[in-house]
Image (tube, helix red, strand yellow):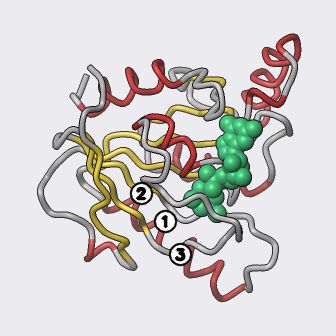
Amino acid sequence: MAITKAEFIVGAASLAQLPRDGLPEIALAGRSNVGKSSLLNRLTGRRSLARISKTPGKTRELNVYRLNDDLVVVDLPGYGFAKVPGELKRKWGALVESYLNERKVLAGIVHLVDARHPPTRDDVQMHEWIKHYRVAALIAATKADKIPRDRRAGSVKVIRDVLEPAPETEVLLFSSVTGDGADALWTWMRRVTRGG
Ligand code: GTP
Ligand code: MG
């Protein structure tokens, strides 16, 4: 069940550059700096598989990774970075929406939100798209290590109240520092990519 192999495949600037090997795919979506790359590194136990950005919002590509030769993870460009000009934001929206709409092998999406704060308007918009395109989703509440234990359940409740996910969508506390939530996340990824 462990991840024994993890490789970076391509930084795709458009959907046409994504792999055509037919492997089931999991996408990571979330605000810039929310911890998408860190989550992937934690999951694979590889410190520097995905680049941890010092400059939020820099990644404009769909970064594609293959795990265990049987599933693909696509790290989507982060959203909600204030300094990104309008034109880039439109391009980002068009790219991500067409990805959700057209990508046949997409089996599920991990939507990352910061456990420390209520979801932003951009988080709400992202989750609306996920619901609209009916993609199986798991919400990972990241940086859970930064909030006290007795506030974690409250944080999960706020996230549910604001994002209004589908009833079957779980909100999972996650920390790439402690590894909390990593096993449950991997179990979910295996399940949705196996079509069950
Ligand atoms: P973009 O690629 O810009 O969209 O950002 P990203 O979502 O990939 O975030 P990234 O993984 O680069 O992490 C951003 C910052 O948050 C880094 O300084 C990480 O070390 C930190 N970070 C990420 N996850 C966690 C976490 O679970 N706990 C703590 N304490 N810090 C985290
Ligand atoms: Mg990143």
Q: Name the amino acid, label 1.
A: Val
Residue drawn 48% across the image and 44% down it: 41
Identify residue for label 1.
96
Residue drawn 41% across the image and 68% down it: 98
Cα gap from disc 3 to disc 1, whole angstroms: 11 Å
Q: Is residue 50 visible?
A: yes
Tell me the crowding category of disc 2: few under 14, some 14 to 19, or many 20 or more residues within 10 angstroms, Cα based. Answer: some
Q: Name the amino acid, label 3.
A: Arg
Identify residue for label 3.
60
**Residue depth check, mark 2 versus mark 3: number of the one nearer the observer:** 3
Residue 37 versus residue 56 in the image, above or below = above
Q: Is mark 1 on a helix, strand or loop?
A: helix
**Residue depth check, mark 3 versus mark 1: number of the one nearer the observer:** 3
Identify residue for label 2.
100
How many numbered markers are drawn? 3
Which numbered dot is residue 191? Answer: none
Left/right placement of residue 107 relative to residue 87 reads: left
Residue drawn 36% across the image and 49% down it: 73
Is ligand 1 within 8 Å of the beta carbon of the residue shown at mark 1?
no
Residue 72 versus residue 165 in the image, above or below = below
Tell me the crowding category of disc 3: few under 14, some 14 to 19, or many 20 or more residues within 10 angstroms, Cα based. Answer: some
Cα gap from disc 1 to disc 2, whole angstroms: 6 Å
Q: Percent x, y for residue 144?
A: 74, 28
Q: Is mark 3 on a helix, strand or loop?
A: loop
Residue drawn 72% across the image and 85% down it: 86
Cα gap from disc 2 to disc 3, whole angstroms: 16 Å
Left/right placement of residue 192 relative to residue 138 reads: left
Q: Percent x, y for residue 71?
A: 24, 42
Q: Name the amino acid, label 2.
A: Leu
Tell me the crowding category of disc 1: few under 14, some 14 to 19, or many 20 or more residues within 10 angstroms, Cα based. Answer: some
